[in-house]
Amino acid sequence: MKNILFIAALLYTTTAFAQHTPLPRGTVYGTHPEGAGIVFADNLAKSMGNRITIVTSIKGKVLKVTKEKGGWFTVDGGHGTVIYAHFKDYRVTIPADLAGHTILADGVATKQFVADDSQHLAGSKVKQSRDNPKQTLKFEVSGLIVQ
């Protein structure tokens, strides 16, 4: 009888821990995004043109949550590129389950250029995009909503 109760308790706890709660649609992190001038993440570099920074809203798929505290994550930029994003407010914490979800985020997009002689990179570890090794896209998020 004790064995049956032990097995039943063991099965109950493993099923309780195995349940995965999906993120509900409409969950907001940071401030609520306005969504004005939405640009799809795969068109962000093209829509920036020659400008170094723009204030915009992007819509894209989160590839990976790098660090939950401070909201550090990567967004699929299309064509093998990645957009490195983080929250402006470090107090924002995002769940690791955000990976794979489509998001709408307000913020500031910035192109970071790498000099031809690469002298400013001495001692640093800067990741560059595969599409254009001279350019990296960064996005500072003020607000995000799960689509």
Image: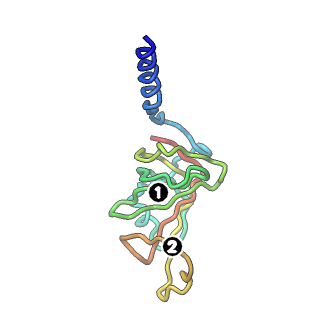
Residue beneath disc 1: 74
Q: Horizontal and vertical percent for residue 34?
A: 56, 46
Distance of mark 2 from mark 1, alpha carbons?
Answer: 15 Å
Tell me which residue sits at (41%, 70%) in the image: 129
The outermost residue toward the left is 79
Q: Amino acid at mark 2?
A: Val
> What mark, if any, has residue 110 been given in the picture?
none
Q: From what the image shows, is residue 137 above or below residue 68?
A: below
Residue beneath disc 2: 126
Residue 42 lies left or right of residue 35; in this view the side is: left
Q: Residues within 10 Å of mark 2 (few under 14, many from 20)?
A: few
Q: Return the residue nearer the eye: 56 or 24.
A: 24
Q: Residues within 10 Å of mark 1 (few under 14, many from 20)?
A: many
The outermost residue toward the front is 2
The outermost residue toward the top is 1
Q: Amino acid at mark 1?
A: Thr
Q: Quadrant of residue 53?
A: bottom right
Tell me which residue sits at (44%, 51%) in the image: 62
Name the element at disc 2.
loop
Q: Horizontal and vertical percent for residue 36?
A: 52, 50
- Sequence-wise, the earlier of marks 2 and 1 is 1
Q: Horizontal and vertical percent for residue 17?
A: 47, 30
Name the element at disc 1.
strand
Q: From what the image shows, is residue 20 above or below residue 106?
A: above
Q: From what the image shows, is residue 41 above or below residue 15?
A: below
Q: Return the residue nearer the eye: 64 or 109.
A: 64
Q: Horizontal and vertical percent for residue 21?
A: 46, 32
Tell me which residue sits at (49%, 79%) in the image: 114
Tell me which residue sits at (44%, 24%) in the image: 10
Residue 8 lies left or right of residue 57; in this view the side is: left
